[in-house]
């Protein structure tokens, strides 16, 4: 049974993955918060009562480790970042209805209540496990206190997650070759009794849950392999002081694992919101709690759905397992409602490379604001550059290009022209009806907007207004009201009335993605109401009859500004690279010389396996850059029997215009992929970081198989 389409007549809660109070915010973080904010505003716009809540994640080992290194109290350190986040979010027009933190009283009580229910329902058990221990200092080393090797994929990993490899959550005792991050001592494993949530009890429930779950593709599919395999019970306690005390009366030496109290903050933050505005306005229990008669862990009943609100989580791809496996089991075990949808956002790259705070290849929130750009420009850029679940590249060049083209040149230009012409010739809206063509266009745009919200498509929510303005520009160009006003004044009045109507619709439709600019446009249209509470259908209502001359909504981003910002980023990355190179030199003085060449794979493949690899001689016949992707090129490669469309990362390394005519080797039976909305059917072989293209020495005919 599928869910009733949004909007429903129940309240909704939209949450975003909690920011971890241990560092400054950068554009990678902001993608999630902005997407969540755009989505929550979009939901309200289509008539769904919505609370948008979040809070800072204060516990866990990274904060404890960082505080220990600085000789500070973890609470003091985390609160400092918490306050910084509270200030930063509104500067990006990210407006939470409530923003709490996991260490506050509400969340401490709520978390302990959850765990007490699990204990009462026998979902908690004690097991002896191996815990990493620093023998020299005689201290336990939970989670991030150790680093080592992932037992699943062999990559370097943190104590609690394989962050550079397979992204798996790692249970205590799982990481191999653990080393203390504070002392550098190799850790040993000791047996310690710990508390576990019996996840295995929820396996059947989770398998059904994942079929009901809505949201983005990855969030719905990636958890299947975990849920269908054997579900390991989840260790919910740690040997440390910083955290929420385990509430059972048999143990006072352990605290709850950070991933227990972190998602519960979604509930606590909603509760705080209810307490502030009153339950008559927003009742947190209507969303989160099932009827009190329903026993925790009881088999799910689809009928409950109509009586409860909608829970929608916006998260990063790296925490899908926590939200689509652990979290629903935690809720179910406490007698709570389940998430309706999970929207997983992709990763943000910088200039075609991955964002790396350790290499300082990042654009910081503060840096964006210091450059003096309006927050709405960033909001538009980051949410519409690619689908919400795809990775998106941030580059200052591309930012300027899109702001200048789509916002200044299209949306801003259209609204300015329309309102200027209207105010100069009619002192506002001409006193005629809008044409059926334009009303139809606006109706379509509204429908597209509603559909996008119902389908969790944040990108389209952000694009609708700009697309409508694009139509407006063509419409004004086609009808030339500046000529018409002398030749046929009646017709000119209709054209201008249409344009004012379109500008009005743009203000309403752009509000979720650009709330500040929408308010500006709304007041230029002579309105004194708040555009954020106007209904979507009001886009078709008559505009105010009088308004004055408009001002430009957006200003051009200048080349010099972008050059400066690029230069700053380049210098920063270089300085950091030199620093770490120095460090490495110092570290490896007595070590044999390291080279950058990967060692040859140990594992041999058979001739049969090699024969399964179908490589062909091909020739690039067409090459063009891909919008929004700084490195990627769309190629058409002739391989004799057919011409393939292939996406390749060559743009920064090869002159795109010179690619046609180049002979290449194409891996023809590579699985198909979609990159930045472009289908890629095959892979062009190239060597190394510089993408040195493989070619042939003689003239083997196109399509010849490489053996
Ligand atoms: Zn791994």
Image: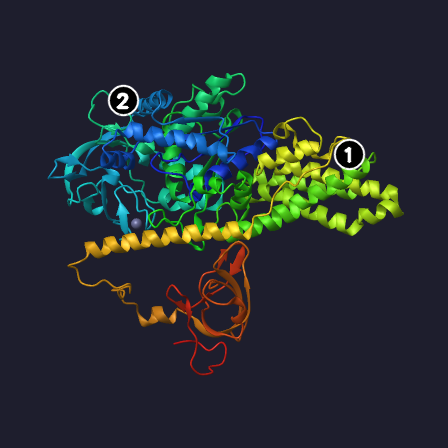
Q: In terms of depth relative to the viewer, which is nearer, 65 or 482?
A: 482
- Asked whether, in this view, residue 90 is left or right of residue 471, the answer is left
Q: Secondary structure at mark 1?
A: loop
Where is residue 416? Give x, y as percent: 70, 42
Task: Say which label, 2 or 1, has the lower sequence index.
Answer: 2
**Residue 600 visible here:** yes
Residue at 41% in and 76% down: 706
Residue at 28% in and 63% down: 596
Residue at 56% in and 52% down: 401
> Can you identify the residue that label 1 sits on?
428
Mark 2 vs mark 1: give the one in front: 1
Q: Is residue 460 above or below residue 104?
A: below
Q: Residues within 10 Å of mark 1 (few under 14, many from 20)?
A: many
Q: In terms of depth relative to the viewer, which is nearer, 8 or 545?
A: 545
> Can you identify the residue that label 2 sits on?
247
- Quarter of the image where one finds residue 39: top right
Where is residue 509? Give x, y as percent: 64, 37
Where is residue 196? Give x, y as percent: 26, 32
């Amino acid at each position: 049974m599928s869910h009733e389409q949004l909007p429903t007549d129940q309240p909704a809660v939209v949450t975003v993955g909690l920011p971890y109070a241990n560092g400054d915010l950068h554009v990678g973080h902001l993608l999630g918060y902005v997407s969540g904010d755009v989505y929550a505003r979009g939901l309200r716009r289509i008539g769904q009562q919505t609370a948008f809540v979040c809070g800072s994640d204060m516990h866990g080992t990274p904060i404890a480790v960082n505080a220990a290194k600085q000789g500070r109290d973890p609470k003091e350190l985390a609160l400092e970042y918490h306050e910084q986040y509270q200030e930063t979010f509104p500067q990006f027009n990210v407006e939470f209805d409530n923003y709490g933190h996991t260490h506050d009283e509400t969340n401490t009580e709520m978390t302990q209540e959850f765990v007490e229910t699990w204990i009462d329902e026998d979902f908690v058990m004690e097991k002896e496990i191996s815990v990493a221990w620093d023998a020299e200092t005689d201290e336990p080393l939970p989670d991030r206190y150790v680093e080592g090797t992932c037992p699943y994929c062999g990559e370097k990993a943190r104590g609690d997650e394989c962050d550079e490899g397979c992204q798996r959550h790692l249970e205590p005792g799982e990481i191999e070759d653990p080393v203390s991050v504070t002392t550098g001592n190799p850790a040993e494993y000791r047996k310690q009794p710990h508390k576990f949530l019996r996840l295995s009890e929820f396996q059947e429930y989770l398998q059904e849950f994942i079929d009901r779950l809505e949201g983005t593709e990855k969030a719905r599919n990636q958890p299947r392999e975990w849920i269908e395999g054997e579900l390991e019970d989840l260790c919910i306690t740690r040997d440390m002081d910083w955290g929420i005390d385990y509430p059972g009366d048999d143990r006072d030496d352990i605290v709850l694992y950070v991933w227990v109290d972190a998602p519960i903050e979604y509930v606590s933050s909603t509760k705080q919101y209810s307490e502030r505005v009153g339950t008559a306005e927003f009742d947190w229990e209507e969303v989160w709690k099932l009827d009190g008669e329903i026993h925790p862990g009881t088999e799910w009943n689809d009928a409950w759905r109509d009586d409860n609100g909608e829970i929608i989580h916006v998260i990063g791809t790296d925490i899908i397992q926590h939200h689509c496996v652990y979290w629903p089991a935690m809720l179910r075990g406490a007698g709570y409602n389940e998430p309706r949808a999970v929207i997983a956002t992709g990763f943000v790259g910088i200039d075609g490379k991955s964002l790396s705070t350790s290499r300082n290849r990042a654009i910081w929130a503060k840096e964006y604001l210091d450059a003096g750009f309006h927050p709405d420009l960033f909001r538009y850029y980051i949410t519409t550059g690619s689908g919400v679940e795809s990775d998106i590249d941030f580059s200052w060049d591309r930012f300027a290009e899109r702001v200048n083209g789509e916002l200044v040149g299209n949306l801003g230009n259209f609204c300015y022209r329309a309102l200027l012409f209207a105010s100069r010739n009619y002192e506002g809206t001409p006193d005629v009806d809008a044409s059926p063509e334009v009303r139809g266009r606006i109706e379509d745009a509204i429908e597209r907007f509603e559909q996008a919200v119902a389908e969790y498509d944040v990108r389209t929510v952000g694009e609708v207004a700009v697309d409508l303005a694009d139509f407006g520009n063509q419409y004004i160009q086609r009808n030339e009201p500046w000529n018409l006003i002398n030749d046929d004044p009646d017709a000119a009045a209709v054209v201008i009335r249409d344009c004012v109507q379109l500008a009005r619709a743009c203000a309403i439709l752009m509000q979720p993605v650009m709330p500040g600019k929408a308010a500006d446009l709304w007041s230029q249209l002579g309105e004194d109401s708040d555009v954020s509470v106007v209904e979507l259908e009001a886009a078709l209502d008559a505009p105010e009859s009088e308004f004055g001359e408009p001002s430009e909504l957006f200003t051009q981003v200048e080349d010099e500004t972008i050059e400066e910002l690029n230069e700053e980023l380049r210098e920063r990355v270089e300085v950091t690279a030199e620093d770490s190179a120095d460090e490495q030199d110092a570290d490896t003085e007595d070590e044999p010389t390291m080279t950058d060449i990967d060692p040859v794979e140990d594992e041999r493949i058979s001739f049969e396996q090699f024969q399964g690899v179908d490589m062909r001689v091909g020739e690039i016949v067409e090459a063009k850059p891909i919008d929004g992707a700084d490195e990627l090129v769309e190629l058409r490669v002739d391989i004799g029997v057919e011409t393939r469309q292939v996406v390749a990362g060559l743009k920064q390394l090869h002159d795109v215009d010179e690619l046609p005519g180049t002979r290449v080797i194409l891996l023809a039976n590579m699985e198909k992929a979609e990159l930045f909305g472009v289908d890629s059917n095959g892979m062009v072989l190239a060597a190394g970081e510089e993408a040195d293209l493989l070619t042939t020495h003689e003239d083997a005919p196109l399509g010849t198989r490489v053996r």
